[in-house]
Every structure is written in C-alpha cells, then in structure tokens.
Image (cartoon, rainbow, N blue to C red):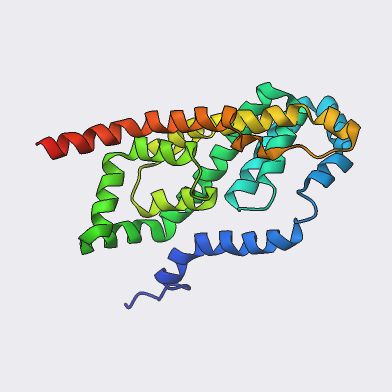
Amino acid sequence: MKKADPPFPRSVLRHLPLGLILAVMLFGAFAFRDLLTFDALAQYRSALLAFRDTHWLWARLGFVAAYAVIVALSLPGATIATLAGGFLFGLFPGVLYNVVGATLGAIGVFLAARAGLGADVAARVAARGGAAARLQGALQQNQWSALLTMRLVPVVPFFLANLLPAFAGIRLLPFALTTALGIIPGGLVFTSIGSGLGEVFARGETPDLGIIFSLPVLLPLLGLAALSALPMVIRALRRKEA
C-alpha cells in the first residue's frame, strides 16, 4: 500500500517553529507596545509589589516564566522586564531571575531554529564550502570564545545572537552556558538600575539607561570581551606559525 502523504509538507514543518516566533513577534510589537513600558511599570508598581509580597513562590516563578516568554518570542520590553526584576526583587536575587529568564528564552529560540531550518542551513553551508563554510568551521572551533564575546559586547541584536549559532551548527551546551555567563555583566547593570526605581518613581523621573555606555561600565565589559576573545587570537597566531 502506498503511504498517505503527511498533512503538511516537510518544508512547511521546517519553517513552522521560526514562523510562529516571527508571527508572535510581529503581533506582540503592536499588542504589547503600551503594556511592556516604563510608564506601565510605574502605573502598576503597587499591584506588582502586593502580589510579590502575598504570593512569594508564584511571583518569582511567574516573573522568570514571563521573562523567558518575552525573550523567546522577541516581544518588546526585555529591558523593562530586567528593570522590573531589580525593582521587585532587588539586585540579588533579581539579577539571578533576570539571567535565568533571559537564558531560558534564548534557549527556546535556539532550539526552535535548530529544530526547523538550523540543521539544514548548517549542513548546506558545510557542503558548499567557501568562505561561509570556513567561517562556520572557525566558529565551531572557537565556539566558547566566540559566543561569550558576542554576549559580552552585544553588537549583534539579542534575537539574531540566538539564531546565528543554530544556523552554524553550535551545540546546545556551549550556547546555553555562554549565554548565561555573557549576559551577567549587563544584567547586573540594569538590575542595579531597577533596584533603585522606587526613588525614581517617587521623583516622577525616568531612569538613565545610557549608563551602560559610560566609560566606568563600558570599559570593564570591553575588557571581559577581550579576555574571552584571547583564545581565538592565540589559536590564529599558532596556525600562522605552523
């Protein structure tokens, strides 16, 4: 007997995970643009604090889950969520909840991309050879250093930084660990700002998020990025000498 054709072609199924994320991202950009804002956080701060105080466990689990969903679906408001983590839970454990939520969301995007187009893209790049394949091979050989540098100096948008490793054939463990470690410095800065929002709300002001580009903050981040990139530089020099 001839096997029945699947209800959806395999090509459609490969595009489905990323397609759903992109569809929700576009929908969320309009549906949640007024909800995940600093003004909304200021407006609902009393209710959020009351829920935190009366529902200790659910407040923390719900916050981490909401943060992960925001990141996984690339909804607007990740920065506001980070500030909210500091406002609700303080610098610590607020930064822990922020890092866990962001990492889980990033892993969700990575796995969706890899389950869909990621594996095919990685295989095709490797099969075709050329500059793209050499770049893919270099990234795979230096995946820990490259991924950590990309997180410490976020020149690549966070959403793309979750997709590119899936398309390059990077393994889950290096991706997850470098994501968690690499976002800690920036997370500490924004969580610290969030922990002082009570005084900012009292004055009716808006927090200065540009502080991350100030020299006292930016220089240590660049230093950490340089250290993380050092193994790549050493390997490149050794290959030239060989």
* Residue drawn at (51%, 27%) of the image: 220
Q: Residue furthest top?
A: 92
Q: Quadrant location of the N terminus?
A: bottom left
Residue 127 picture location, percent across and down: 21, 61
Q: Is residue 46 visible?
A: no
Residue 38 picture location, percent across and down: 79, 44
Q: Quadrant of residue 200?
A: top right
Q: Residue furthest front?
A: 215
Q: Is residue 167 visible?
A: yes
* Residue drawn at (40%, 76%) of the image: 5
Q: Residue furthest bottom?
A: 2
- In the image: residue 87, left or right of residue 127: right
Total numbered circles: 0
Which of the two residues, 75 or 113, is positioned nearer the viewer here? 75
Which of the two residues, 188 or 12, is positioned nearer the viewer here? 188
Residue 69 picture location, percent across and down: 63, 47
Up/down of 43 relative to 21, above or below: above
* Residue drawn at (61%, 34%) of the image: 214
Residue 107 picture location, percent across and down: 50, 43
Q: Quadrant location of the C terminus?
A: top left
Up/down of 54 relative to 40, above or below: above
- In the image: residue 201, left or right of residue 78: right
- In the image: residue 211, left or right of residue 87: left
* Residue drawn at (60%, 32%) of the image: 187
Q: Quadrant of residue 194?
A: top right
